[in-house]
Image: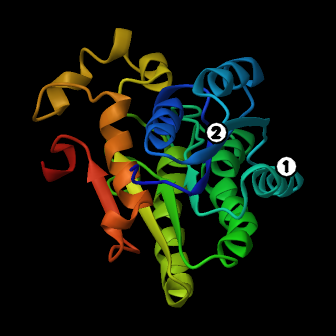
Amino acid sequence: MGKLDGRTAIITGASRGMGSSHARRFIAEGAKVVLTDLRSDAGSALAQELGPNAKFVEHDVTNAADWARVVATAEDFFGPINVLVNNAGILGVMAKTADVTEEEYRKVCEVNQHSVYLGMHAVIPSMLKGDRGSIVNISSIAGLVANYGFPSLAYVASKFAVRGMTKAAAIEYGPNNIRVNSVHPGFIMTPMMVEATDEGGGEALLQIPLRRIAEPEEVSNLVLFLACDESSYITGAEHVIDAGMTAQ
């Protein structure tokens, strides 16, 4: 018996990296999963690979109408939504405050922060049809400390905001048995991290007490825990998975 048997989940940014890892783990644990992303070819291929309990929807997470379509698709195919993983995100421009343009700043905040609001706003009414729900918002250690290795005011601002939004929603919907938690990864071996570091993070290793970069599956273990009933008394909390980086 899987930890997510009978649950319907939406995972954004699911075509690659951590999102695809979360999707694989959820399917293995019995969930029915709607995968969303702008990368339609990769997303469709992954859904086909995962089988009949996976459905891909091309989705702009910054668009409210797209969110309504994703929720409708999930309910039509699988039923009311029990789990939402707000995973989609971008690093954006790595620039200091005086150097980042307003357009660049807005883009990062739209994708990383506003999409989390849109996702919760769209999905919570579906969750209220059932007896429980779990929302997992993927933030970052940049939502805990500003000095995380890259100069990026926009990224830090967006990830700190996700942390606060998570706590607010957790308090609001606790009486409805809807739990909301944030996950704060450090350096994870994903395409986004490879693009942002030197050949996959050689220099980054020196900042990490465990002296290694995590695999996406290690984050998926935590996301699964927060999505399932094993974490039934956990809400409004930030969960750090960073090999000790923020302990320094």
Name the residue at 32% across, 44% down.
Answer: 221
Q: Where 179 sits versus 67, above or below?
A: below
Looking at numbered disc 2 in the image, what kind of residue is underneath it?
Asn
**Numbered badge on residue 53:** 2
* Mark toward the start of the polypeptide (2 vs 1): 2
Looking at numbered disc 1 in the image, what kind of residue is underneath it?
Asp
Q: Specify whether 141 is left or right of 24.
A: left
Residue furthest bottom in the image = 175
Q: CA distance from mark 2 to mark 1?
A: 21 Å
Q: Residues within 10 Å of mark 2 (few under 14, many from 20)?
A: some
Cβ atoms at labels 2 and 1 below 8 Å apart:
no
The percent position of residue 141, horizontal first and vertical second, equals: 34, 49
Q: Residue 45: which quarter of the image?
A: top right
Name the residue at 49% across, 85% down.
Answer: 174
Name the residue at 52% across, 79% down.
Answer: 168
Instruction: In this rendered view, identify the residue nearer to me: 195 or 116.
Output: 116
In this rendering, does residue 102 appear at all? yes
Mark 1 residue element: helix
**Numbered badge on residue 186:** none
Q: Specify whether 170 is left or right of 147.
A: right
Q: Specify whether 164 is left or right of 8.
A: left
Q: Residues within 10 Å of mark 1 (few under 14, many from 20)?
A: some
To which residue does mark 1 refer?
66
The percent position of residue 233, horizontal first and vertical second, equals: 32, 77
The percent position of residue 30, horizontal first and vertical second, equals: 49, 46
